[in-house]
Structure formats: structure tokens, C-alpha cells
Image (tube, coloured by chain):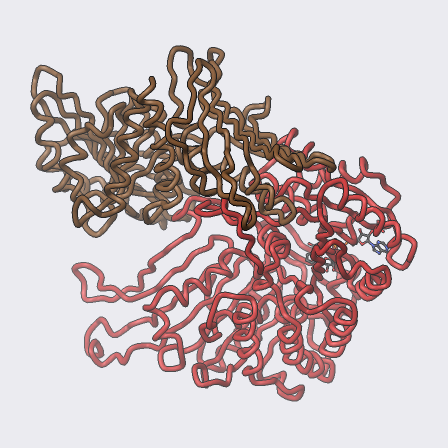
Chain colours: A brown, B red
Amino acid sequence: MTSMTMVEIGAIEHELRQLWSESAEKAPDGQAVIRALTLNLLACTHDAEHADRMTDAIQQLTASHPSRAILALLQPDAPEPRLDGFVQANCLLSRRGTPQVCGEQITLDARGSAVQQVVSLILALLVPDLPVVLWINNPDPFAEPLLARLRSVVDRVIVNSQAFAQPTSAFVQMAELERAVSSGGLALHTFAISDLTWASLTPWRELTAQFFDTRPLLPHLRRIDHVTITYQVPSGADNPVAGLLLAGWLASCLDWMPLEDAFSLEPDLIRFYLRRPAVGVGTGAIRLVTLDLRPVEAASGATPGLLALHLEALDGVTASFRVERAETPGYALTTATIAGMEPISRLARCEEPSLADLLAAELRLRHRDQTFSDALRVAGLLAARLRRDM
Amino acid sequence: MSDLPNPLRHGLRIGRTPEPCTVVIFGASGDLTSRKLVPALYNLARERRLPGGFSVVGFARRPWDDAQFRQVLLDGVNANSRSGAVETELWASFAEGIHYQPGSFDDPSAYARLAERLAELDQRRGTGGNRVFYLATPPEAYPDIIRQLGAHGLNQSPHGGWTRIIIEKPFGRDLASAQALNQQVLAVFEEPQVYRIDHYLGKETVQNIMVFRFANGIFEPLWDRRSVDHVQITVAENLGVEDRGGYYDHSGALRDMIQNHLMQLLALVAMEPPVSYDADAVRDEKVKVLRAIRRIRPEEVATYTVRGQYDAGSLSGRPLPGYRDERGVDPASQTETYIGLKLFVENWRWAGVPFYLRSGKALPRRVSEIAIQFKTVPTMLFAETPMHDIEPNVLAIKLQPDEGITLKFGSKVPGQPQIRPVTMDFRYGTSFGVASPEAYERLLLDCMLGDSTLFTRRDEVEASWSLITPIHQGWLASPAQPFPNYEAGSWGPTSADEFMARDGRTWRRL
Ligand SMILES: NC(=O)c1ccc[n+]([C@@H]2O[C@H](COP(=O)([O-])OP(=O)(O)OC[C@H]3O[C@@H](n4cnc5c(N)ncnc54)[C@H](OP(=O)(O)O)[C@@H]3O)[C@@H](O)[C@H]2O)c1
């Protein structure tokens, strides 16, 4: 890792070249330094503390996604206009005799009215012919002016719905934006949306899906009529997005349609009713699924997020499928219980992913994640109902 | 492969998990089980690739109970797993599904008890009659086990489940014994149930050979006799025979390495693009390559092969006794621990291009690679200049230790009228920053999912033996070799260098 060098804004490219030849000279004999860039990663925030955490994550990402990262710290409310730039190379420690892989980072610190100049600078610094990803780490990302001004060059926008200041309304906004961009209705150039909260659900989705890779258990999936999603929220805050996304995912995979106005809201229970396709042909009857979101106030120090997902088929042969956080952090317990059979349970890893892990998971995607779009569409419908009532 | 229409699978970024099943390991108290198989299964469980209900039954003679067996495996995983020491709670959950069934391979009542145990597990752990039988035993035991499985109806599953059998190497000692074994296996199992393992095929980089060739348009037009001068395939080991001397002395490098691993590598570099990436399409193309290789007749072995056996020396600074002094080895042994081989693939694409294969023990480094050496450009352009000294382009596919691809090409030295070779280096490890799974993980998972692409088919094994057997016969008929003829820790006998020099070529320095 090299330390940050403060540079003249006009000389950033020159400084980067300088940095590269220095690293190459400093490398031990016979050890090459490889400049490997797989994408342009634009990261923006308004908060200096966030900027540090983002830099850490970008450095960790070098292993899997060496990039030209441009981190913009935007502080429009600062009194004095000022724009500073820093460059650094993010290099992996390498074993002897193997080449060192490096990405590069440009940090722009913009204050006051100088914030206006950042976009033109970013556009000049993009490496041509590589994807452009914009990571907005800000509690109201869709109001970020940078998004509007860069949308014509951006291929992917990454946000984190768990950190939204107005969770339900920003969530509904995200669902609408995603629908607009995915229908291509906005412009010729469209981009994909990634939500880090969605990425964090992957182990939960995987553990849930695994029950039904088994032929004898698969038929029960279409019979599910009760779903309970329990999640932990910090005291005072209520952000149901993780639960909504998981619910949206189940509903979109299983063709469940939320029923208009059929929903109830209590302090520790949000209940939705959905219509499920009938099992088998000719039954014709409308089947209902009740879907409960249960927020649990987190003890201090506990991480917010999902605690348990419970799927049940109660009508007919009872079947129950449960994934829950185990007592030991980093694990989940899965249990399948079918009437007349011994319950089958197992412990599985379900580690808390780091910020860099979540970003890496989304950066691995080359295109729009259709499953996410579908889940978000239904989750957006559910959120819209909540927004009206909250 | 049957794809289950599990609607929750859509868009999940990892592949599906197999159905709950029981893996029955014959030879479960042996080295392979605790060093490779169970660490691989544990890592699969750790990465959430195994379903709840997944079970293991170990079968061997030692009078252990479940608890003893679990402890041995736990020690094995702790010592050998790529993910380090086990996670205690995860192991506890995984180990609940591990059982031990003592018995001798020739004792019918042991199989009856095994059948009962499996039926009980189907009930209790929901394994639905799905079974993998893994033969991790001395090869002499294969016929007995296979016959007994058939006799006890274990070659087929109850309840509409599936039964598969994995057979370790060596698969035969020559063409006749491989054919006989195939007959014994296929008298009891159907070919689609049979998974002949060659763990080389489970290595990520080996699979990448195909991706590299067929997903990158720029190389394929150069991949033939017009552009390629020759191909070198090297698998070098920097170990002696260790404690496998007894086995090795009856096998040797030709049968232990060339027949399976190097032939597979050759087939993958030389094959035509398969019509699809499915088990039979890929294996059809590989078999075609093997069948197109010109057979070396016994009387031609001196021309097309070179052999060596290591003498005392040192490896990475540590002394190593000579091969003939290893435990289990005949003091006058004629077994080769080094082999060099020249083969020709006689088809439209490769006619006239030699494929040089070499493999040996007690060499300076552990390295496997495939190098495609391209023809040198006509040097007229730079002939009268100081830049006439142009080296050929070489594309090297490195399999281990650092997996990756390098391309050597000529470049002008800045400011000087000189051309120097430079290498462009691409490494999987650093480019993707993720640890590759162990070969056995991939292969066990593929078998449980019913995908046999990376396993060898009956005709493939036989085609390969039909090339190897005449070479071995030729050697037996030749005068005794002046063994030992290379020092442990060197790059093999000088005769191997002469072997290449005769063709005006040299082995790559690795
Ligand atoms: N080890 C490796 O790294 C490696 C690599 C590639 C391929 N392989 C192949 O894998 C196979 C197994 O290798 P290994 O090294 O694990 O062998 P090993 O350590 O010698 O183990 C042999 C196993 O077979 C059992 N066994 C032998 N005769 C038996 C009988 N009559 N009845 C019941 N059990 C019997 C032994 O059990 P008891 O001692 O309890 O009787 C032991 O569990 C071989 O075919 C080998 O070529 C091994």
C-alpha cells in the first residue's frame, strides 16, 4: 500500500503514472507490478467517517476487483469552496516471486460550491472501455445530485437500503426507479441497481432454497400458507427492508400476489395477505398466504438484520421449514419438519458479510439481477402499503 | 443431469445442492479418506453445498465404533483441510451424519448389515435411497466389493433414488486388466452410474483449459500444425515415493501418471470443440484424440521414450535416499520414476506436431504445465540487424503451483536495437482473489449431482491403456536400464536431454 499523495487537480493522471513507475522500481528483483483494472468504481459520500470505511472496503476489493476507484467526499454545506485531490495505489501484498497486483484510488475532497466541479473531473478521469459503477453511500441516495448528472455514463448504481433515512419511502422510490430503468423507458442508456441489503440475504436465500432441492420436499413449497420473518431492529429505529426484500423474493418466486388493502399493522407485527396459485389443476379456490414480519428490538450491541424465516404448510399434511440465526454468531440452524417424519436439521455457516464482501458480490454481476428486480417489485408493493399507514 | 424445477433457485449465485444422500466409503480407515475425502466433504458442508440429512458411512476392517471413527476423521480434517482447523459446532452438526460399519470386504454378512444401516438412514435422515459408493481401497479389493454390492441388491436404490459408484485410480494395470475390471463393474452397474476418478480433472485450472481454448476466439485459429511447433506437457513432483514404495514399485511413472493424468491433459489441449458442455459430448472428443494418437510399438520404445530412476540426492535442501533404498522397493528395481515420451496425434489438426510428455519424482520443483511452442517467424525482416535473435512465442498454461497463463513474446528493448522476450503473466489466484476448491470437493459434488463430465468413461480408460500397454511391453523386452541414472533434486537423466536434443529441441526450464 502506498500512502496518499496530495496532488494538483490538473495533474492527477500524471501523478498516477508517476506512482506506477515508482512502485515498479521499488518492487524486489524479478517481481513485476501488474496494474489490473477491471472497472471504474465511483464512490460518493457526504460523511468523512464513511469515506474512511469506504476506502478500507475498496482496498480489500483489490483482490477480486482491482479498479480505478474515485472516491468523492462531498460537503456542499462547508463555507469555503475547496477541492483537493489525492492519489494512491492499492496493492496486494504478494508472495515472493509473484507479481504484485495493484488498483488505484483517487480521492476528491470537495467543499462548498466546489462540489459542482466534481462531475466534470470524474468524467475526465474515467478509464475508457471499462464498466462504471456508482456506489452512493448516503441515507437519501436517490436525491443525490451526482446520480442525476452521471446517469448517462453509469452501468450500475449501488445503494444500501438498510441505511435509508426514510426506509419505506426511499424503498418505494428505489422500486419505481428500478422498474423505470429496467423497462428501458428512461433513456437509451440504462443502468442496473444493486442493493447491498439484498446481497446480504444471499445465504438466507440459499439455505431456504436448499430445502427444496430435494425431490420429496419440493411439492411442499407450493403448499406454503404461512410465512414468518423475524428481524432485529435497533431500538427506536424501524427499518423493515431486509424482511420486505425476503418476502418480496418468496412472493415473486412463488407467484404470490399481495391482496389490496389486506394487511394489518401492530407494534410488533406487520401482517400481509397474499394470493397464491392453487395447487394442482381444477381446484379453482383462492388460496391465501399470511406473511408476517416481526420486528424484535435488538439488545444493545446486537447486529440488526434477519433472525429467522419460517415457512409452513398448515393445510393438509403439515410441513415446516425454518432457517434461524444460531446462538453462536456466524451460523444458522435449518430444520425441516414434515408430519410423520423425523425432523432434519443442520447447522450451517451464515456469516455476517463485510462491506467489501457485499460489494464484491454485486460487482461480480455483469447484468441486471432479474431475481432482485422481481423481488423488489413485490417488496415495493408491500412497502407502499406500509408507507400509507405509517 | 436432471434439473429440479425449484423456483427458489432462480438467480442464486451458487449452483444447486445435491439431494440428501449417503456416501459409503470403502477403505474408510485409510489414508485417502482422512487426508482428502472427508476434508473435502467437510469443506463442502462448510460452504453450504451439502443438504441437511447428508450422511457418511465408513466401511473397513478396524473394529471401530461411530465415535472412534468420527474422532479419526476430525483429526484428519484438522490436519488436512484447506480451511484450517474445524469450526467446532459446524463439525458437531456434520459429524451427526457420520457412521462406521466394521467388516471385511469378502464377508457377505457385513454387506447385509450395511444394507440395513442404509435403509435405516434413509428413514431417519431423509436420504431417500440416494447413495454414492466410494472405493478408496487397494485395487485388488474392487472386484470383491462390486460383486458383493450386486449380490446384496445395493447396485440399485429403493424409493426411486439413485446409486452411483466412484472408483479410484489405478483403474487397471494394463489394457487387459482394465477391460476385465470394466466388465466386472458393468456386470453390476450401468455405465452412467460409474464415476472413474482422475483427480487431475477436478483441478480448477484443468477445467480452465477448455474455457481458455473455447471461450477466447484469438487462440483457436493458431491451435494447429500450421502455427504450433510442438507441445510440452510436464508434471513434476518434488517428492520421492514416500511410504508408497511398495505400491509404486509395481506401477512406475508410465502407469501411475502418464496413463491417466498426462493423457487427460493431452486430450484437453488437443481435442476439437465439443458440441456442448455435457458429459458425453466432452468425453466423445477426448476419446477421439486418444484414438488418433499413433501407437508406439514395443520395438520403437527406444525412439519415442526415455526413462529414469532417481538416485540419492537432496530435495529442497533435505537429503533423500535413492529410490532403490526406499521402503517396499526392490533393491534391483527396474521401475521408472521418470519418463519422457514423444507422441503424435495423427489427425488433420495435429499431423506432424510432436507432443512431448514428461513426468517424474524427486525433481527440483513441483510444477505442472502445458506449453504450446509456436513456430518461429521467418526472420528476414530483422535478419541483418542486431535484432535477428528472436525467440519463439510460447503460451504456457500453468496448472500448479501458481495457476495461470503466460505468453512469451518478443519486444524491443527501449532505446536499443535489440529484441528481448517478455512474458505476460495472468494468475487466477491474484486475478480473482478467491481460493479454488480442492479437486476432490468438485468431483464429489459433481458425482452427487449426477454430472460425470470430469470423470473418465469406459472407452477413454481403455483407449489410454491401449497406448500405454505396448510401451510397457517394449520396456520389459528391452535390456535392463543403467538405473539409477539421475540424482534426486535434478531435472532427470541426461538421456532425457539427449532425447530432446535429437529433435533439435530442449525441455523447458521450469
Ligand atoms: N492416498 C492417496 O493419496 C491416494 C491418492 C490417489 C489415489 N489413491 C487410491 O485410493 C485408494 C486407497 O488409498 P489409501 O492410500 O487410502 O489406502 P490405505 O491407506 O492403504 O487404506 C486402505 C483401506 O482399505 C481397507 N481395507 C483393505 N483391505 C480390506 C479388507 N479386506 N476388508 C476391509 N477393509 C479393507 C483398510 O482398512 P483396515 O486397515 O481397517 O483393514 C483401509 O481403510 C487406492 O486405490 C489408491 O491407489 C490414494
Q: Is residue B13 left or right of residue B100?
A: left
| Quadrant the N terminus of chain A occupies | top left
Judge whether B71 appears above or below B111 on screen: above
The answer to which image quadrant residue A72 occupies is top left
Residue A120 vs residue B341, the one in the foreground: A120
Foreground pick, A276 / A213: A276
In the depicted view, which residue is nearer to us: B375 or B100? B100
Count of marks placed on residues: 0
User: What residue lies at 68% left-to-right and 41% top-to-bottom?
Assistant: B53
Looking at the figure, which quarter contains the C terminus of chain A? top left
Q: Position of residue B242 (x, y in %)?
A: 71, 54
Taking the image as shown, residue A290 lies to the left or right of residue B318, namely: left
**What is the x, y in percent for residue A278?**
52, 43
Residue drawn at (32%, 68%), measured in percent from left and top? B218
Q: Is residue B1 left or right of residue A276?
A: right
**Where in the image, quadrant-wise, is ligand 1 located?**
bottom right
